[in-house]
Image (tube, rainbow, N blue to C red):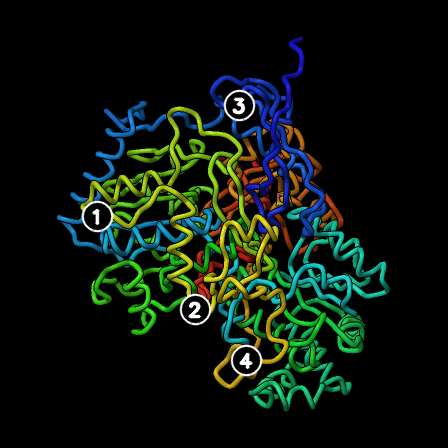
């Protein structure tokens, strides 16, 4: 074997995957990466000479990485990634040069817009894009294409929590406190998050909490590895978290846990919320949720009886057609018991995607401009237009939300740019979405690999990966961090900023689209100055020095804001607002034809649509394919054994996967992970019923029928 090459440099950066944005180092060998190196990637697979190493100084993960982060360099291998642009000729994708590919994209958009109007062009972004890319993509849609139709896959991630945050507190930041506060609280209620699998290094914050004598309540229809750590696990029927929160508020009120002084001094709207909760008798809530009243009471005693407490939600309660109200009900519980706006207390959302936080702040959402500025507010439009050097009147208004945009592909929207997203696998009612994508006049996909969505494209642009380009992300705490390039991209690969710059030029906008990420960030600072998500005081140099800065940070002498709402909430009167909500069933409940609940989620070794992680051998060995988790009682009823191939059918489609029999799930519910395409695609089944406020689809609950595949 060849001697190990000399290791010459370690670049401090962050993981490309989830919202924890773990700190890591990248050690690039003497060969310098792609140009000459073909050695280890940390996974034992051939690729550029890059190794992921621990970076213990970064406080969020203190050097710990999960398997996804440890093997992230494996996706840099030339064998699994795109290495040149692809254009479709005679029905097949063939390699092309960048000029040809960019010309095709510009021609494709121009032809569609000339024939059908500006809004016939659409843009679909991603929650994994850096702040710079998200910002420039939003600007590209509004200034170059002049379309209102831009949204992104973060709509499918945490939009319900974001909407509830804004309603209650006047401001949306995933966590209003740093993760380091969690072990110091008295009780944490974690609703619908399996962070032991989705962001393993974060589990220590919960175990430190219980080690410190605090209590942990986990609410999940499955007894996950996170639930196994809990002081108390509540296992409700999928889609009933709203009723459970109302029942617990009822008990808190009835048993004298309301912090009347806090409610009077710092909130508004309690009387309506109190009346709504009192209509949800514990016995009624037990009938709806399946959670026994004594367990609810114990959870209330732990939470409301503790001097401090936190509620943390994730996709479980959020990905519902009533997700915004559900999160609002949990916030009500925090407010009524005085557990918000105080140290070591509050409500937070455990955002999922790598830049799920920053990705929603900087203008790739249908209804927002950078900094959370509103696309309908005249002053906000004027500020951003001035930074962009355009007439405010030229900026389009609000567009369609993510699913609504995908649903009109081929009719109202005829050409689409997808950047950093794989909706063929990750969108609800995925077979329908795939048909819509196929019906487009023109589809261009920018990605690092040939994803299932890229396979449908007319042009595929190979983009640089996290290790090959510098840019900022904002983690789930609101901490703005810097991913630093450690090596150059391969010869045929360019950054997304390069693609946007050259497309803008071809479409007649020759300035305002820099390829240098730091220049884009400087413009982003100006665009967000004075806004809620204010980045004006954050610079690349400062992030390097301080290893992250919390927004809002209005000027360079400002220390940043790790903790929000301690003095006042971000509403006009400074008070947090209760919401008046009542239980309602899921959009689709089980019936005689489809008698079971389906809920979906993630597994430890795969990430989101799996486009990257399914290409890593070590991760595939750990999680090689989809499965259907079902309870032994249900398996007996169906005559099914471990490993039998099952067919799961909903009103929208069918998926097949082997049975995994486990007592950790409710007997009225089956679970499927959603990382895979093909016959085992869980999102073939899911329901696109939308939350009326956030426009979040109901991924987390629908009705299905399960049978042995050969019998169906
Ligand atoms: Fe990466 Fe998330 Fe794993 Fe950390 S927990 S290494 S950020 S995937």
Q: CA distance from mark 1 to mark 4?
A: 45 Å
Asked whether residue 528 appears in the rendered view, the answer is yes
Q: Which residue is mark 1?
A: 509
Q: CA distance from mark 3 to mark 2?
A: 41 Å
Dot 1 surroundings within 10 Å: few (below 14), some, or many (20 or more)? some
Q: CA distance from mark 4 to mark 3?
A: 56 Å
Viewer-side residue, 108 vs 629: 108
The vertical placement of 545 against 586, above or below, is: above
Dot 2 surroundings within 10 Å: few (below 14), some, or many (20 or more)? some
The vertical placement of 709 against 284, above or below, is: above
Where is residue 20? Give x, y as percent: 62, 50
Quadrant of the displayed image that contains ligand 1: top right
Q: Which residue is mark 4?
A: 579
Q: Which residue is mark 3?
A: 32
Viewer-side residue, 598 vs 532: 532
- Mark 1 or 2, nearer chain start: 1
Viewer-side residue, 681 vs 94: 94
Q: Mark 4 falls on what kind of element?
A: loop
Say which of marks 1 and 3 sits in front: 3
Residue at the top extreme? Answer: 1
Q: Which residue is mark 2?
A: 531
Seen at 22% across and 52% down, the residue is 120
């Amino acid at each position: 074997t060849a001697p190990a090459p000399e290791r010459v440099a370690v670049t401090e950066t962050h993981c490309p995957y989830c919202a924890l944005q773990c700190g890591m180092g990248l050690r690039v060998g003497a060969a310098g990466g792609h140009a000459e190196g073909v050695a280890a990637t940390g996974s034992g697979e051939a690729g550029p000479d890059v190794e992921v190493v621990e970076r213990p100084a970064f406080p969020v993960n203190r050097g710990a990485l999960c398997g996804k982060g440890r093997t992230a360099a494996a996706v840099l291998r030339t064998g699994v990634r795109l290495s040149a642009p692809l254009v479709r000729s005679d029905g097949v994708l063939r390699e092309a040069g960048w000029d040809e590919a960019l010309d095709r994209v510009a021609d494709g958009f121009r032809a569609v817009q000339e024939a059908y109007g500006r809004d016939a062009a659409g843009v679909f972004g991603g929650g994994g894009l850096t702040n710079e890319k998200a910002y420039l993509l939003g600007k590209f849609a509004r200034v170059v294409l002049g379309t209102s139709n831009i949204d992104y896959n973060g709509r499918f991630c945490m939009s319900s929590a974001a909407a509830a945050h804004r309603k209650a507190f006047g401001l949306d930041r995933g966590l209003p406190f740093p993760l380091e506060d969690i072990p110091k609280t008295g009780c944490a209620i974690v609703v619908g998050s399996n962070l032991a699998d989705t962001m393993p290094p974060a589990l220590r914050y919960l175990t430190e909490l219980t080690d410190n004598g605090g209590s942990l309540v986990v609410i999940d229809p499955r007894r996950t590895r996170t639930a196994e750590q809990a002081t108390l696990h509540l296992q409700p029927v999928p889609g009933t978290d709203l009723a459970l929160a109302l029942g617990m508020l009822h008990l808190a009120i009835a048993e004298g846990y309301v912090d009347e002084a806090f409610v009077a001094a710092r909130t508004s709207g309690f009387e309506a919320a109190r009346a709504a909760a009192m209509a949800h008798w514990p016995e009624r809530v037990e009938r709806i949720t399946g959670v026994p009243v004594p367990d609810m009471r114990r959870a209330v005693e732990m939470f409301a009886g503790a001097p401090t407490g936190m509620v943390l939600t994730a996709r479980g309660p959020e990905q519902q057609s009533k997700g915004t109200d559900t999160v609002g009900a949990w916030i009500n519980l925090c407010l009524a018991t005085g557990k918000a706006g105080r140290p070591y207390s509050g409500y937070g959302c455990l955002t999922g995607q790598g830049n799920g936080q920053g990705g929603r702040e900087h203008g790739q959402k249908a209804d927002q401009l950078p900094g959370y500025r509103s696309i309908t507010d005249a002053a906000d439009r004027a500020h951003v237009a001035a930074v962009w050097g355009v007439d405010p009147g030229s900026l389009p208004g609000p567009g369609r939300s993510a699913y609504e945009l995908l649903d009109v592909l081929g009719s109202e929207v005829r050409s689409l740019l997808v950047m950093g997203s794989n909706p063929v696998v990750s969108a609800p009612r995925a077979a329908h979405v795939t048909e819509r994508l196929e019906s487009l006049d023109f589809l261009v996909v920018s990605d690092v690999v040939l994803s299932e969505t890229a396979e449908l494209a007319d042009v595929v642009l190979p983009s640089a990966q996290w290790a090959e380009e510098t840019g900022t992300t904002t983690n789930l705490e609101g901490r703005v961090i810097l991913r630093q390039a450690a090596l150059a991209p391969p010869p045929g690969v360019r950054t997304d900023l390069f693609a946007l710059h050259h497309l803008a030029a071809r479409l007649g906008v020759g300035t305002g689209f820099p390829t240098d990420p730091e220049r884009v960030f400087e413009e982003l600072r100006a665009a967000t100055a004075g806004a809620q998500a204010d980045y004006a005081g954050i610079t690349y140099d400062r992030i390097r020095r301080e290893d992250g800065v919390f927004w809002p940070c209005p000027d360079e002498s400002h220390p940043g804001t790790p903790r929000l709402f301690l003095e006042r909430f971000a509403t006009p009167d400074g008070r947090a607002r209760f919401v008046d909500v009542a239980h309602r069933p899921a959009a689709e409940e089980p019936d005689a034809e489809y008698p079971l609940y389906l809920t979906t989620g993630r597994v430890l070794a795969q990430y989101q649509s799996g486009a990257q992680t399914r290409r890593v051998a070590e991760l595939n060995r750990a999680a090689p394919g989809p499965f259907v988790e079902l309870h032994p009682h249900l398996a007996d009823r169906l005559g099914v054994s471990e490993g039998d191939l099952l067919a799961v059918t909903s009103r929208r489609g069918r998926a097949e996967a082997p049975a995994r029999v486990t007592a950790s799930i409710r007997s009225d519910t089956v679970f499927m992970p959603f990382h895979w395409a093909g016959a085992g695609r869980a999102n073939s089944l899911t329901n696109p019923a939308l939350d009326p406020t956030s426009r979040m689809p109901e991924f987390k609950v629908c009705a299905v029928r399960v049978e042995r595949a050969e019998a169906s």
